[in-house]
Image (cartoon, rainbow, N blue to C red):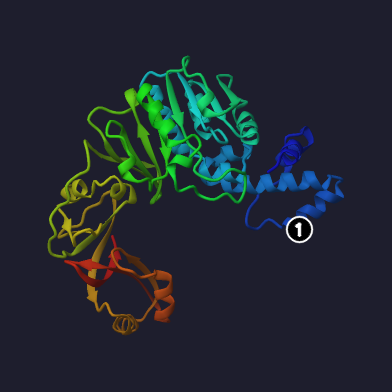
Amino acid sequence: MDRAELLELMSPDGLRLLDELPPYTSATDVLHTVSDLRRAGHPPARVAAVLSQAKLRGKAVTKFGDFASRMLFTQAGLEQATRLRVAALHAGRFQSAGIGTVADLGCGIGGDAMAMAALGLDVTAVDSDEITAAIAAYNLAPFQNAQVLNAAAESVDLASVGGVYLDPARRTAGHTNTARITDPDDYSPSLTFAFETSKRMPTGIKLGPGLDRELIPTDVEAQWVSVDGHVVELGLWSGTLARDGIRRSALVLGDGETAELHAPGDSEDEPVGDLGEYLYEPDGAVIRARLIGDLARTLGARMISDGIAYLSADTAARTPFAAGFRVLETLPFPEKDLKRALRARDIGTLEIKKRGVDIDPATLRTRLGLRGSQSATIVLTRVAGRHTALLVARL
């Protein structure tokens, strides 16, 4: 999105047209819609801007639900935006800590700031990109307790706020076709600035879940968040925003449930033991937080091999922190033998899970060429250090 497109979109006629369009779905006939809008007398630039925005609103439903239909986005801003359900938990941290004024530095399209304002916090949302700041101002317009500044995070005077929330840009500049930044020193604002801020005042920092753990300060609470089985972020919390005695946390959200596993630090793994009747695959947030050992102890489980994040137990248990499977058979691991075994069982549809083995499931599935009538799940991993194929059934 450039300045001209933004001005076209945010004109009274552009916003009116956007709101009149039906929701954008995979079934939307774009060519037909463009033709109809052009025949109605709308200029090409307005049609292009409005349809691009309608498409982004359609994608945004997974993060913002019904609110998406009343918001504006850039492609890059939507990709990095916090899901509304997670943003509400961020905002709740500040509210629970008694912090009433927050500076949201690197606010993007304003998702976190919206959640904070909705809880009654006074929010100053800041973004260095002019177009992104304008989008955030539109999204925050319904809230009298929110203001937006187009400024560099480092230039903002924080003397009047009680806490800071930072979501450093982790992609290259621009609004479409951006690339992921791998060096934290190149984040905007930089990780150094974020950590220095966290030493001076209560601060929340949203980062990618794959951040090098060696970079995490020892005096913050590190919380990995997973939504519907996908690890979406690492949150670092300092000062009164960090909970006493908690330095590692795995927060798992799914199917309307919220569950958390936490500890004062990394947990010690359970010893490797025999493969039992049940196999557990810990949620990615549990793995990232290195709380597999604590999870194992709650399940009465053990490791199946050193360095492999699968657990095994002799009894079945329900847990929000892991997917459970019953081990049906141990199959041969060599590909030709595995193919023969699966064909003998009339398998045609195959889910392949793997950990600790150098195999691409999609490529293997193609090479196996299965055409049976049954479906199955196999786990390719190491058991007691040996490559193993397990035929399993989900609990």
Amino acid type at mark 1: Leu
Q: Quadrant of residue 218?
A: top left
Question: Is residue 204 visible to us here?
Answer: yes
Q: Quadrant of residue 393?
A: bottom left
Q: Position of residue 140 (x, y in %)?
A: 59, 28
Q: Position of residue 197 (x, y in %)?
A: 41, 26
Position of 46 with respect to 306 (left or right) is right
Q: Position of residue 391 (x, y in %)?
A: 27, 71
The one of 333 and 103 positioned closer to us in this rendering: 103
Residue drawn at x 63%, y 53% is 25
Residue drawn at x 32%, y 65% is 354
Position of 253 with respect to 125 (left or right) is left
Report the quarter where the C terminus lies.
bottom left
Q: Which residue is mark 1?
A: 31
Q: Quadrant of residue 21?
A: top right
Report the quarter where the N terminus lies.
top right
Identify the secondary structure beneath mark 1. Answer: helix
Question: Is residue 23 visible to us here?
Answer: no
Residue 125, placed above or below residue 67: above
Q: Position of residue 66 (x, y in %)?
A: 57, 39
The one of 71 and 288 positioned closer to us in this rendering: 288
Q: Residues within 10 Å of mark 1 (few under 14, many from 20)?
A: few
Residue drawn at x 37%, y 22% is 200
The one of 172 and 350 positioned closer to us in this rendering: 172
